[in-house]
Amino acid sequence: MAETDATGNTLGDAASSAGTVALDHREGTAVLRVDGALDLALAPKLRQLAERAARTEPAVLVIDLTGVTFLASAGMAELVRAHRGRTVPTPLRVVATGRITLRPLELTRLTDELAIYPSLAEALAAG
C-alpha cells in the first residue's frame, strides 16, 4: 500500500479539483509533472512537492507543464520561486510548449529567466 499524507494523497502526488502534480525521480533528476489548471488552488501543491523533491537533493529539478490547461500568475510565481532557489536549491528546467503555457511565460518575459525546453526528453538530456 502506498504511503499517504493527511489529505489522503500518495506522498509524491498532490491534487486539487483543478489538477494534479506528480513527483517522479529519474537518474538523479526530480521531475514534477503538472496536469490541469496551475492556478491559486494548485500552486501551493506544486511548492509542496518541489520542497519534497529538494529534500532528495536531485542534481536538477524539471517541472513539466505539458499537461497544464491554464497557467495563472500564481503558478508562474512558483516557477520563479523554484528557479531563484527559494524552494529548491538546484537548477530548474521547465517544459513548456504552445500558447497555454509558453505564451504566458513569453509575455511576462520569464523565458528570459527560466530554462525552457520543448519536451521532457530534451529537458532530461540537457547537460
Image (spheres, grey):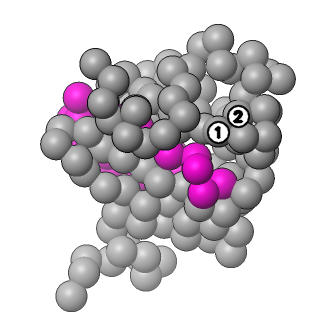
Residue 97, numbered label: 1
Marks 2 and 1: in contact by CB < 8 Å? Answer: yes
**Residue 60 shown left or right of residue 84 in the figure:** left
Q: Nearer the viewer, residue 66 or 42?
A: 66
Residue bearing the label numbered 2: 102
Q: Position of residue 101 (x, y in %)?
A: 71, 41
**Residue 111 shown left or right of residue 29 in the figure:** right
Question: Residue 112 sits in which quadrant?
Answer: top right
Q: Is residue 9 above or below residue 21?
A: below
Q: Residue furthest top?
A: 112
| Image quadrant where one finds the N terminus | bottom left
Secondary structure under badge 2?
helix
Q: Residues within 10 Å of mark 1 (few under 14, many from 20)?
A: some
Q: Residue furthest right?
A: 107
Indicate whether residue 34 is drawn in magenta.
Answer: no
Q: Nearer the viewer, residue 72 or 105?
A: 105
Instruction: Please report the residue visible at 70 percent of the width from the left and 34 percent of the height from the top.
Output: 102
Instruction: Please report the residue visible at 33 percent of the width from the left and 68 percent of the height from the top.
Output: 11
Q: CA distance from mark 1 to mark 2?
A: 5 Å
**Residue 95 shown left or right of residue 112 in the figure:** left
Q: Is residue 65 above or below residue 36?
A: above
Instruction: Please report the residue visible at 78 percent of the width from the left and 32 percent of the height from the top.
Output: 103
Sequence-wise, the earlier of marks 1 and 2 is 1
Secondary structure under badge 1?
loop
Indicate whether residue 54 is drawn in magenta.
Answer: yes
- Looking at the rendered structure, the kind of residue marked 1 is Thr
Q: Nearer the viewer, residue 43 or 71?
A: 71
Range of residues picked out in magenta = 46-68
- Looking at the rendered structure, the kind of residue marked 2 is Leu
Q: Position of residue 71 (x, y in %)?
A: 74, 46
Instruction: Please report the residue visible at 50 percent of the width from the left and 45 percent of the height from the top.
Output: 64
